[in-house]
Image (tube, coloured by chain):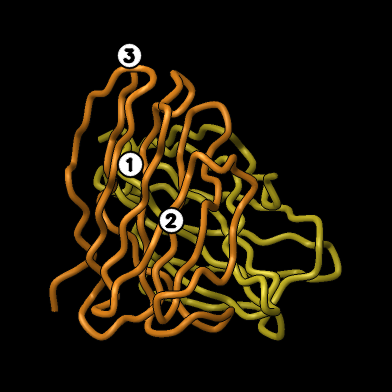
Amino acid sequence: KAGVTQTPRYLIKTRGQQVTLSCSPISGHRSVSWYQQTPGQGLQFLFEYFSETQRNKGNFPGRFSGRQFSNSRSEMNVSTLELGDSALYLCASSLLPGPKETQYFGPGTRLLVL
Amino acid sequence: SQQGEEDPQALSIQEGENATMNCSYKTSINNLQWYRQNSGRGLVHLILIRSNEREKHSGRLRVTLDTSKKSSSLLITASRAADTASYFCATNSGGSNYKLTFGKGTLLTVNP
C-alpha cells in the first residue's frame, strides 16, 4: 500500500505570496492532519480534517487554512507569506480520527520564504 | 506548546551500544507515541504505548511508561549506524480535540 504523499517536496516563495500544499493520504485513510516543523518551535499541530470537515485547529493565524476533498485528499494554504513561515510542513493520515489511531506521516514539503 | 520534553537533546554512542532516551510530559494522556525522523524527512512511527500499559517491545525497541511520573523512555538495544536519527515522543490527550503534541526530540548519532 502506498504511503502518504505530499507535493511539491520543495518550494521557494517570496514574502507576500501565497502557497498551496497537497497531501494524499494512505488509501482508505479518512483523517488527515497537518503539522509545521521549524528548528525553533519544533513540531506544531496545524489542523485536522475528517469527512471534509475541520475538526481541530492549532494555534496559528488565519493566514493558514486547509480543506479536505471527498476522496480524503487534503490541501493547506498559506496566504501573505512571512519569513517565519519557512518550515517543513508534514501531513499525516489515519484510518479514523481519534486517540487510538496511529498517524502515518508523509515526507513533507519544505517551504522556503525569501 | 510543547507537551513532551525529550532528554537528552543529543546522544552520541558507538555501534552495538544501547541508547536510552527519555520523555517527560505535563498533562494526563491517552497514549504516548515515539517517532523517528531521518535528516529532516518525514516521521516514521515506531511504537505506541497506551496509558494503561507499562512496557512495550518491538524488535530492538523497548518503551516504558510511568504515568505517575509523567515520563516515558525509549531504549534501542544493539544500536546500528542506521539508527542515527532524531527521535520524538508525542502525547495524545484524547478527547474530541485530538492532536499529537510533540517534544523537541533527541538527536541520536550512532558511530560505526
Question: 10 Å neighbourhood of mark 1: few (<14), some, or many (≥20)?
Answer: many
Do the dots labelled 2 and 1 sit on one chain?
no
* Chain displayed in orange: A
Left or right of B31: which side holds B36? left
The residue that disc 3 covers is A114
Do the dots labelled 1 and 3 sit on one chain?
no
* Chain displayed in yellow: B
Quick one: which residue is furthest to the right in this view?
B68
Chain for numbered disc 2: A
The residue that disc 1 covers is B84
The amino acid type of the residue labelled 3 equals: Leu
- How much space separates mark 1 and mark 3, taking CA atoms? 31 Å
> Can you give x and y, in whole percent of width and height, for residue B67 in the image?
79, 71
Q: Is residue B104 above or below residue A58?
A: above
The residue that disc 2 covers is A34
Q: Residue at x 44, y 77 (%)?
A: A50
